[in-house]
Image (tube, rainbow, N blue to C red):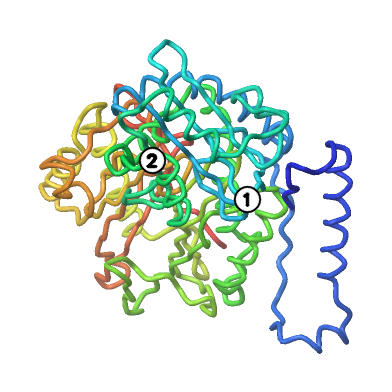
Amino acid sequence: MMIPRRSAPSLALATLATLAALTLATLLVATPAQAQMTDVPQRRTIAARRDPFASALPSWSEQIRVRESWLDKRHEMLLGMMRRHDLQMWIVVNEEFHNDPLAEFIAPPRLYTGNRDFFIFVDTGGTALRRIAVTGYSEDNLKRWFESPDEPRPITTVLPELVKRYQPKRIALGSGGKRGVTRSLSHDTWVDLTTLIGPDAPQRVVPAADLIEEYLDTRIPEEMPYYTRAVQLTESLARRALSNEVIVPGKTTVGEVRNWLYDALWAAGVRTWFQPDLRVQRRGMGKASSRGFLAVAPESTVIRRGDVVHLDFGISVMGFDTDWQKMAYVLKAGERDVPAGLKAAMKNSHTLQDVMMKTYSRPGVPVADVYDSTMADMKRRGITAMIYSHPIGNQGHGLGAAIDFRSAQRPELGASGKKLRKGSYISIELNTRTPVAEWEGQDVFVMFEDDAHLTDDGWVFFRPRQESWYLIR
C-alpha cells in the first residue's frame, strides 16, 4: 500500500504497512463456512514462493533514493532538450489520484496528493534551468530539485508571474500528443492553465510530445544495472512458470498458471503492467487468431502432453517495465527431447533475431530501413516472419523508435520513420511460423520477446536469449 506524502516518518510508514498487510491477510483467510457464502470459485492453489532473484532488488526506501539520484543527471540534460525543441517553458501537472505518468520521472518518485501539483521548467536564457514546484503541501525532498517554499503559493499567482517575467514564446503542455503519456493533461486543467497564461495562450501553448519522447527514450548509465536486475527477475519467474514447479500435464490450466504468476509477483514485491498471457499450440488443433496474432488461450484450457506453451509476461519495478516471451514444450510419454521440427522452428526465430539486431540495426538508421531489410532477408531465406518490436523502459510500450510492421512506415513520420537512438531500450518482439513435419506439416509459431539496448554494433540483450525449448516433463 502506498502512503500519502503527508504521512508520518519512515518508522510509522513501516508500521502502517505491516498493519495493512496483516489486515489484508486476515481478510483473505476465510473459514470453510465463510467460503461457502461467497461467489468466488474454488481453484487448485499452487504456492508461489519468493523468487531468489527478488533479493537483488533494493528495498522500497532504497529504490526511492536511487531513483532520486537519477534526477540530477536527467535535469542536467533537460535544458538542452528544451532548446532543441524550441521550448522556453514546460509544465507537468499531477492530479490527485489521477497521476500524470511523467511525474515520477521528472520529480522525486513519491506520492503527490495536493489536488493539483505543478512542476514548471523555465529556460531563463542562462546556463541553468529554473525549476519550480507549485504543490498543495510542502515536501522536504522537492526542495532538492525545485523551488518549493514551506508555505506554497497558488498557481494563480506563480504562473502569471513567470510568464510575465520570462515571456516564453512556446510553452509545452501534455496535450495533443498521440500517446497516453503525451496527452495526459485533463481538459479542465488545460482550460485553467491557458487562462492563467493569458489571451495569447493559443499562440504560445504547444504539445510537449517530442520533448517527452526524447526525455523518456534517453537512458543514463546509472539505470542499466537496476534494469538488468528487473529483467533477470522476469526471466526467473517466466522459467518457473513454464516448468513442473507450476505445470502438471493433464491437470494444470492456463488460468492456474496466470494465478501463480500474480502470486509470484506479490511474493517478489513487484507488480505487472499487463495481464500475463499464455498461448497453447497443439497438434491437430485449429489456429485461433486475434488481430493477426495467435490468440490467447482461454483460462479453462488444460495444458496437455505434446503441447507447445507460450508465455507473455512482464514486471514493473523502480519506474521500469520489462516484457518477456518464452516457449515451452510438454514432453509426451516416452519422449526425452523436443521433436526435430520444433527445434528447427526455434532456429528460424533465432535467425530473425540475429538478422534484425546485428545485421541491420545501428544508431541513426531509420526504423523502416531496418524493418524492410530484415523482412527481405527473411524472404530470401524462406522464413515466414513478423516483427513488432517496441521501445521499453519507463513504460512497457515506451516512446521512441519502434521496429514494427505497423509503425515502421507511418506517413506522418516520413518515408523511413524514426531513427534508432543509441542507448535506447527496446523489446525485441517477433515471431516465425514454420511447418512441423511431426505435426503433419501444421504451422507452429515461435514467439520471442527479449529486452535489449542499442550499441554501436546493434542491439544487445540484457539476458542471454532462450537457446532451447523449456521442457515440462
> The residue tagged with tag 2: helix, strand or loop?
loop
All told, the count of numbered labels is 2
Label 1 sits on residue: 115
The answer to which of 278 and 242 lies nearer the viewer is: 278
Q: In which quarter of the image is the C terminus?
A: bottom right
- Local crowd size for mark 1, using a 10 Å CA cut-off: few (<14), some (14–19), many (≥20): few
Sequence-earlier tag: 1 or 2: 1
The reply to whether the C-beta atoms of the residues labelled 1 and 2 are less than 8 Å apart is: no
Q: In this view, does 128 lie above or below 275?
A: above
Write the residue at 27% across / 71% down.
442
Residue 40 higher or lower than 303, as above or below: below
Q: Which mark is residue 449?
A: none
Spot occupied by residue 93 in the image (x, y as percentages of width and height): 51, 43
In the figure, 288 relative to 473: above or below? Answer: below
**Residue bearing the label numbered 2:** 198
| Local crowd size for mark 2, using a 10 Å CA cut-off: few (<14), some (14–19), many (≥20) | few
For this rendering, which residue is in front, 338 or 110?
Answer: 110
Furthest residue toward top:
127
The amino acid beneath tag 2 is Gly
Q: Which amino acid does label 1 sit on?
A: Asn
Q: What secondary structure is marked by label 1?
A: loop
Residue at 42 percent of width and 33 percent of height: 90
Which quarter of the picture shows residue 140? top right
Judging depth in this view, the residue of 461 and 331 nearest the camera is: 461
User: Is 364 on the left or on the right of 340, as rendered?
Assistant: left
Residue at x 11% of width, y 46% of height: 376
Q: Position of residue 468 (x, y in %)?
A: 43, 48
Determine the CA span between mark 1 and mark 2: 23 Å
